Image (spheres, rainbow, N blue to C red):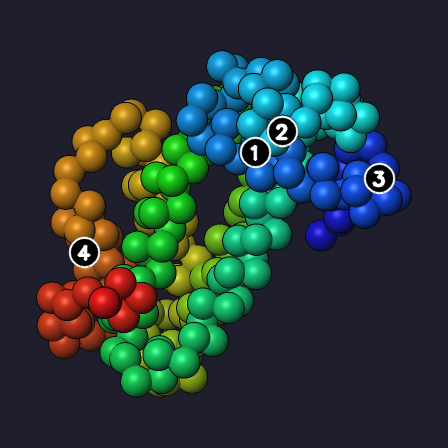
């Protein structure tokens, strides 16, 4: 994956102070887009949230579209890193796979909910044919997550689905689709635990992973 500096419309920064200002702008952009979405967010909002001037923004990004592209790139990089880290967490060595699958789906649901405006902006701009094509990177991220899930299950000798890797990718993409559909339609935001458990049970059934009652308890990442 290319670096942020290589993206069209992202202006080069050579000093540590300039990189810090760019990082502050990107961090602020996440919050602003999550709250307002793309169309309602303005460069002045992003600069103000970052504690920077509008001029500072334009010294680092050509326009709002280039900034959004950099933000999307940063999100995908972090998603890949978090996915790789997730499957190596030591607690999964002693937990049923069903608990791990639920925690994975729970994490995806919470990321989408926390970044509601950002994801809505991605879909709205794509459906309108505006801006860059963001979906190859998004699909690649889900594919990698599915491959890691298949590797995890195969190492345990679990998962009865034929072509396990492709089945895991399909299951996670289907879950993404269900969560996105709920988000784009502003609901129905029924009980979050019910949504996560229901999607988890569907994934486990499709992949041939026994539940063993594991979904009646919270995942270890949420226990106190």
The residue indicated by pointer 2 is 51
Cα–Cα gap, marks 3 and 2: 18 Å
The residue indicated by pointer 1 is 28
Residue 35, image x and y in percent? Answer: 42, 26
Q: What is the quadrant of the C terminus in the image?
A: bottom left
Pointer 1 with pointer 2, Cβ within 8 A: yes
Pointer 1 with pointer 4, Cβ within 8 A: no
The residue indicated by pointer 4 is 197
Toward the viewer: 174 or 85? 85
Cα–Cα gap, marks 4 and 3: 45 Å
At 49% from the left and 33% from the top, the residue drawn is 31
Residue 202, image x and y in percent? Answer: 22, 57
Would you say 192 lies left or right of 34 here? left
How crowded pointer 3 is (Cα within 10 Å; few <14, some 14-19, many 20+) is rated as some
Q: Element under label 2?
A: loop
The residue indicated by pointer 3 is 13
Q: Earlier in the sequence, mark 2 or mark 4?
A: 2
Cα–Cα gap, marks 1 and 4: 33 Å
How crowded pointer 2 is (Cα within 10 Å; few <14, some 14-19, many 20+) is rated as some
Q: Earlier in the sequence, mark 1 or mark 4?
A: 1
Residue 187, image x and y in percent? Answer: 23, 30
Cα–Cα gap, marks 2 and 4: 41 Å
């Amino acid at each position: 994956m290319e670096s942020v500096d290589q993206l069209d419309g992202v202006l080069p920064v050579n000093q540590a102070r300039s990189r810090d200002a760019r990082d502050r702008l990107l961090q602020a952009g996440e919050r602003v887009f999550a709250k307002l979405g793309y169309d309602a967010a303005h460069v002045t909002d992003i600069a103000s949230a970052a504690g920077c001037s509008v001029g500072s923004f334009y010294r680092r990004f050509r326009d709002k579209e280039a900034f959004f592209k950099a933000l999307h790139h940063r999100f995908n990089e972090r998603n890949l890193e978090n996915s790789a880290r997730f499957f190596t967490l030591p607690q999964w060595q002693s937990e049923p796979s069903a608990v791990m699958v639920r925690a994975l789906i729970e994490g995806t649901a919470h990321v989408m909910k926390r970044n509601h405006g950002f994801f809505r902006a991605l879909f709205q701009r794509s459906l309108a044919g505006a801006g860059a094509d963001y979906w190859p990177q998004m699909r690649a991220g889900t594919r990698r997550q599915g491959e890691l899930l298949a590797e995890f299950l195969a190492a345990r000798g679990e998962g009865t689905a034929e072509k396990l890797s492709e089945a895991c990718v399909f299951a996670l993409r289907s879950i993404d689709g269900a969560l996105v559909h709920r988000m784009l339609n502003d609901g129905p935001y029924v009980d979050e635990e019910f949504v996560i458990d229901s999607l988890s049970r569907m994934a486990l059934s499709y992949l041939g992973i026994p539940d063993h009652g594991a979904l009646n308890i919270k995942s270890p990442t949420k226990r106190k």
